[in-house]
Amino acid sequence: MNPKVFVVDDHAIFLSGLRSELGESFEIVGEATDVDEAIDAIRKAKPDVVLVDVHMPGGGGAAIVSAVVKDRPEVRFLALSVSDAAEDVIAVIRAGARGYVTKSISPANLADAIRRVNDGDAVFSPRLAGFVLDAFAGDATVIADPELDQLTAREREVLRLIARGYSYREVANKLSLSVKTIETHVSAVLRKLQLTSRYELARWATERRIV
Amino acid sequence: MAGGLAERLGVDPVVIRFSFVVLGLAGGAGAICYLLLWMLSANPEGHAVPVSIPPAVRPTIATISVVTGSLLVLRGFGIWLGDGVVWPVALAATGSAVIWSRGRHVRVAPLRIVAGVLLIAASIASFLAQHVGLNTPRNLVFAVTITIAAIALLLGPWIWRIGKRVTEEQRDRIRSEERAEMAAHLHDSVLQTLALIQRTSAPGEATSLARRQERELRAWLYRRSSPEERATLNDAIDALAARVEEGYRVRVDAVVVGDRALDERLKALVDACGEAATNAARHSGADSVSLYVEADDSSATAYVRDQGRGFAVSSVPHDRRGIADSIRGRVERYGGTASIKTAPGEGTEVHLYMPRNGNGG
């Protein structure tokens, strides 16, 4: 059965483009162009995966994600954006999205990312991998919880390869690991990113008034 | 009259009449009240009132009555600074209010000013008349102070209004300058590109124009505000990616970790990256190139990768100087290293390493 997909974007042209690209492999169960509309419609439509634009008037993708995941934890979010601003992307991930891809992604790769998110995995584009390496770089001023506030050497290795443009499969080959193991590492990084209290992330959050 | 008032207040008319009689006995106040009420109230049959007062003025009369009444009551209770102080101050305040309250009818303004100035002058005069002879220096200073206070009362609101208008104008000007700057920027960049895209027929070219414009706009929106801040690794890599995209119609996915200010070594590294990315764009046949640079304070590493056709390193003719000079030469000059991993059909990855202090240079 095809995953049910809901798309949220305040640009109608981009929405219709997404619809025609994804319509064959997925069941598009709804779309919305602003935050409030999206929150209501997602609750009603019960999609498996929501594609959400990072930048939207009225709080952005982060507002939608945090509003919906509270009472519908089974809905999975994939963030989509043209934005370069690390803090915005990180905010959506910390709100609960399971991945981030740039809007220039090819249709095939986007479909792949949606399936991956639907399976409960994390989707790291090269850019997100770069943001995360940046956020976890160097010594944090306060390491409250080493489990959450630091990446393991292996996790860094995996993220670096993703940032260099390697697919999960290629990363697995390069490190002589299984794709499943790579997915485990990436999910662990996602979890740390969502839960860490590292200074950089806290600063980003307060600057954007997102806690 | 008493009947009308009683109806209005919901009290027996007898009570009202009795009150007036008592008030009338107490120093004549009742008689004055009765007269005023008779002048101002409409009689029960709805005939015109004896003295017709325009509705606009009524609140003013009411206010004056209430204030005067309150002052009299305070005076009666002995909460009072003395007749010589309170009445002139009240006069002056009224004068200032008359001048400075915004009337609905602008044309009465000169009249207001004359009335206000007269009131304030009367206030000063009465004040001075009571307290002075100007024959001692102390009294002179006192008189001057009072006059200055009166002038402040006259001109203060005017100066305050002018000040407010000046700040407002300043704010408007800053806002419009920002607007103009943004309009100019959008005109030079986005509008030009949109015009170009409309004139171009090749979809590949439209894409590369759009992507370049996207990069520029994003850099302008999200990043540096002043030119001095621009010399960072991140910006250099962005510019490089844009150049390659534009020149060769491939997508360049650039990721920078650990942005640093550009120095000689980082510049050399960026140049070497540019050469590698150009090679990838020209020869690999891939539609995208990945560019990854990571820098910290001790070293910088870069990877330039494509998933194109690759090549056998031994097959590159010696006169092709790209790899030897532009890539390896640039980084080795500063003590760095360059290596290439490729094979026919397997894409190409160039790895560059640059120490950031010590060794060579």
Image: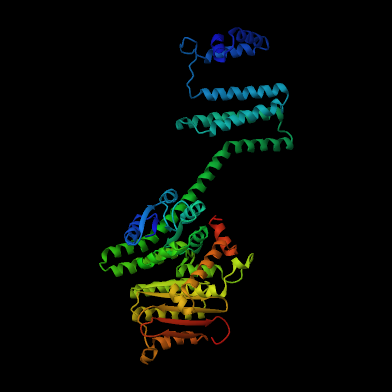
- In x, y percent, where is residue B319? 36, 91
Let me know if residue A83 appears in the view: no
- In x, y percent, where is residue A54? 45, 58
Residue drawn at x 43%, y 81% is B349
Closer-to-camera residue (B329/A111):
A111
Closer-to-camera residue (A182/A204):
A182
| Residue farthest left in this picture | B201
B250 lies left or right of A180: left
Q: Is residue A31 above or below residue A129?
A: above
Quadrant of image for the N terminus of chain B: top right
- In x, y percent, where is residue A21? 33, 62
Let me know if residue B153 appears in the view: yes
Residue drawn at x 48%, y 67% is A128
Closer-to-camera residue (A33/A209):
A33
- In x, y percent, where is residue A182? 49, 72
Residue drawn at x 33%, y 73% is B249
Q: Quadrant of residue B152?
A: top right
| Residue farthest front in this picture | A1
B20 lies left or right of A19: right
Q: How many marks are shown on the rendered structure?
A: 0
Q: Is residue B187 above or below residue B306?
A: above
Closer-to-camera residue (B148/B311):
B311
Q: Is residue A50 above or below residue B131?
A: below
Question: Which coloring applies here?
Answer: rainbow
